[in-house]
Amino acid sequence: MSESISFIASGSGTSSTRKRERIRHVWAFLFILPQLIFFVGFTIYPIIMSYVYAFFDWSGLGPLSNFVAFENFSKLLQDDKFWNAFGNSLLFMTAKSVILMPTTLIMALILNQAFFRGKVWYRTIYFLPVVTTTSIVGIIMKFIFGNEHALVNEVLMALGILKQPIPWLGDGSTAMAVLILIGSWKFFGMMMVYWLAGLQSLPGDVYEAAKVDGASYWQTLRSITLPLLMPVATVILLLTVVNSMHVFDLVKTLTNGGPFFATETVDLYIYEYAFSSSGFPRIGYASAAGIIFGLTIFILTLALGWLARYTKEGRDAKHAKLAQMQEGGVLK
């Protein structure tokens, strides 16, 4: 009799527990529902519809009626202006990655040293541009580089470096160089933090063994730090590539794609056709450009993702080798 009562009590307890769990799940869903609605309405739906618009000659007004199949893609691939913007985006991404990957690693190595004083202060200073609105940065930098009497020309001429002012944003080559340098400065702090996180995740026992075996700092850096950082490096490179391929607000406020489309990127190209002020917008054509550019970024992401997995396997093998060397006492 007592066993039957305990079985009924345990069953009722389980039922009440399940009921409380269901109520908790319902409340959790209700709390995330507003964000889910906005995410679907302003992210998922526009992405899906961009694939639909790409097959129509549509200005954004009226119904979707003029179906053109792949005509937008065909015209786009024959448009020299698109390929110019595409090349500028690739140039910006490549130059920014080449500049930032080594410089941010060096700064992270310096700030990661235990004896370095004021590390928190320096990290904050380098990270401030990251949290500054990009469009505001573009507007300010336009006053610094914008004309012959801009601040940078006045300073360089006062120091005797320049004999006459340079139209930094008036020439295509210098305008792109300025754009790359400002973009690199803006993202410098973020990449430095990525490197610091990677450095602080490395196993300390390997460094202790290297210190016991008498390895110098440069030997440790070459044989331990850099090989173990390779998977982190590929992830940082992936984040840099994705971030650098999408540059709009800085270009829009600093150069607006000029001079003579020398700094126009794909994001600005899509914006001009989707929200043209000189004629009817071409939403379908702009959607086709976005799809091609998005597929390009997707392919780059897949390639870098494969590289990340490959380097992770190499890191694991290197870690195992270092462990064997540590046991044998041959890490020198």
Image (spheres, rainbow, N blue to C red):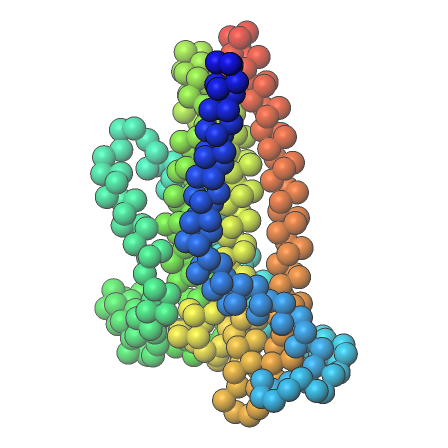
Name the residue at 42% across, 21% down.
204
**Would you place residue 108 above or below residue 299 in this image?**
above
- Number of marks in the rendered image: 0
| Residue furthest out toward the top | 328
Q: Is residue 211 left or right of residue 300?
A: left
Residue 18: give x, y in percent of width and height. 49, 36
Name the residue at 48% across, 30% down.
12
Q: Quadrant of residue 58?
A: bottom right
The reply to whether residue 164 is in sight is no
Residue 303: give x, y in percent of width and height. 66, 48
The reply to whether residue 314 is in sight is yes
| Residue furthest out toward the front | 1
**Would you place residue 176 above or below residue 193 in this image?**
below
Residue 209: give x, y in percent of width and height. 44, 14
Q: Quadrant of residue 159?
A: bottom left
**Would you place residue 221 above or below residue 307 in this image?**
above
Residue 46: give x, y in percent of width and height. 57, 70
Name the residue at 43% across, 79% down.
170
Work out whether residue 254 or residue 20 is closer to the camera in this orientation and state it.
Answer: 20
Q: Is residue 232 left or right of residue 161?
A: right
Work out whether residue 25 or residue 306 is closer to the camera in this orientation and state it.
Answer: 25
Name the residue at 62% across, 51% down.
301
| Residue furthest out toward the bottom | 279
